[in-house]
Each structure stands twice: as structure tokens, then as C-alpha cells.
Image (spheres, grey):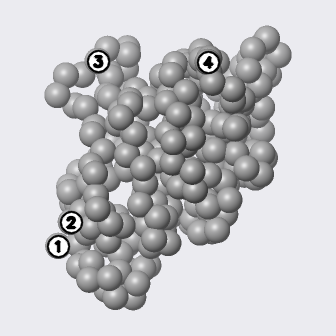
Amino acid sequence: MQFAIITPTHQRRELLPDAVASVRASISAPLDFSFEHLVYDSGSRDGTASYLREAAAQPGPPLRHWHSPGRLLAGPGRNRLIAEAAPEAWVVPLDDDDFLLQRTLFHYATQIAAHPGRPWFVADFLRVDETGRYLPGEDYYAWQFDTPTAMLRAIFRAEHFLQGNVCYHRPFFEEVGGYDTELKMAEDLDLYVRFLLAGQLPVLCPHISHLHRFHASNVSIGVDADKHNADLRVLYDRYAAQLQQLGVAAPG
């Protein structure tokens, strides 16, 4: 079993080393699996490229990195990283300002072994401030659903969402077409909607996947209820025919 942790980055030289260190601290014992961290630097001008060269030269689990002179959206950046992963890799997205927990991959590997044939998994995550201090009352808990349609209904009612708290099999990712290359926001949720439209409900894992860091330059700053509903409307319109056939109503 092999994991690929994928991280697109842009202008996060101060925060990225924490994400890299958190991946390198992963512990597999007593299970037998391998992992590598794949990072795509999208047009950074803050020393990210030199940092990644230095970090990749250090002993430890593999860190591979690529660079583009201009900025790419997150979707195409993630697609390029997954194209470099092993054909049967299990993909774990990690934002460049977040922390992977030490046993996250171990817990995903345990659940993958316990659920053969299931192509994607979802876990809980916690929120921390810019210093890494835990924020009480801000925990994210994944919900249990009976069917993919029930989960789609909750998503488009703005009752439930998913971020980087997932693990999925590369062949399934390719089957549904990968990340959209044009969406500026919610490209991850768009992918998970297509996972559900393919008839696959995620396995709910009883562990914490990562620490999501709040800070002054979060990409999601300014995404309030109105903006989230607008993003949901864009996603709904893309798949309206399939969603309506399933009885999933449009966002209110």
C-alpha cells in the first residue's frame, strides 16, 4: 500500500515547513506501507523553491517537488501531482498551511484494509489558530449517511461539507475525471460530488485527519454563508440533470 500526500503551494514559505514536517513525522508501524509527499509550487516568489530543494535533500521519507513560473489554480496543481503518484496510490490532500497528524496514514491504511473495494474515506479534523493553538468549539465532524443521495442532499442544503479530510484511490479519481481545472473555489467539493454521483459513499473513519490552521491569509477568508451558497449553486448547475434525477433539490 502506498500513499501520496499532495500539497499545492503559493507564497507560503513561512507556513509550508510545518506541513512538510508533519508529513515526515508519520508513523506506519506496525503496518507495512510507504508514503511520499508531493508538492507543487505555483509561482511563489518568497523562497519556497529553495526551501523545497533543501528539504528534499534531507534524510527521511521522499519529498518530491515541481515548480511553475506562474500561478496555477489548486485544481490543475493537484492534478499534476497525482499524475506523478504511483498508479495504485492512495491520495491524501494536505493544504500548505495545515498539519497532518502522525497516525493519519496508519488509520487510513487500517480502514482501507478493513474495507476492500471501497475507493474513498473521510475523517474528522480540528481547527487551530495561526500559532497552532487548538480552537475549542471549532471541530469538524464527518456525518454518517446511508446513501450517496442522502449525502448529496445534505451538501446542497449547505448542512454538510468536505475539505482535505479525505483519502481516495487514484484509479477512482481518474475514473471521475480528476479535479476541475477552471473552478477558482470549491474544486475539492466538486470532485467529491462526482464521487457521490458515481454511486460511492465514503467510509467514515473514526480518527482525526489533520489540523486546519486559521490565519490572516487563508484562501477561505470571506467565504460566508452567502458565498458558500453561491458556490453550491455553481456546482449544482454543473450536475443539475443527474441531481434532479436523484431528487436532490437546488440550493435555496
Q: Are marks 1 and 2 in contact (CB under 8 Å)?
A: yes
Tell me, yes or no, if residue 107 can be seen here: yes
Question: Which residue is labeled 4 in the image?
Answer: 30
Counting from the top left corner in percent of width and height, residue 83 is at: 76, 52
Q: Quadrant of residue 159?
A: bottom left
Q: What kind of residue is marked 3? A: Tyr
Q: Closer to the N terminus: mark 1 or mark 2?
A: 2
Q: Are marks 4 and 1 in contact (CB under 8 Å)?
A: no
Give SS at disc 4: loop
Q: Looking at the picture, does residue 148 appear above or below residue 6?
A: below
**Residue 134, numbered circle:** 3
User: Circle 4: is it few (<14), some (14-19), or many (20+) Cα within 10 Å?
Assistant: few
Q: What kind of residue is marked 1? A: Gly
Give SS at disc 1: loop
Quadrant of the snapshot with the C terminus: bottom left
Q: Closer to the N terminus: mark 2 or mark 4?
A: 4
Quadrant of the snapshot with the N terminus: top right
Q: Quadrant of residue 189?
A: bottom left
Closer to the camera in the image, 236 or 5: 5
Tell me the CA gap for discs 2 and 4: 42 Å
**Viewer-nearest of discs 3 and 4:** 4
Give SS at disc 2: loop
Q: Looking at the picture, does residue 62 appear above or below residue 114?
A: above
Q: Are marks 2 and 4 in contact (CB under 8 Å)?
A: no
Counting from the top left corner in percent of width and height, residue 35 is at: 69, 30
User: Circle 1: is it few (<14), some (14-19), or many (20+) Cα within 10 Å?
Assistant: few
Q: Closer to the N terminus: mark 1 or mark 3?
A: 3
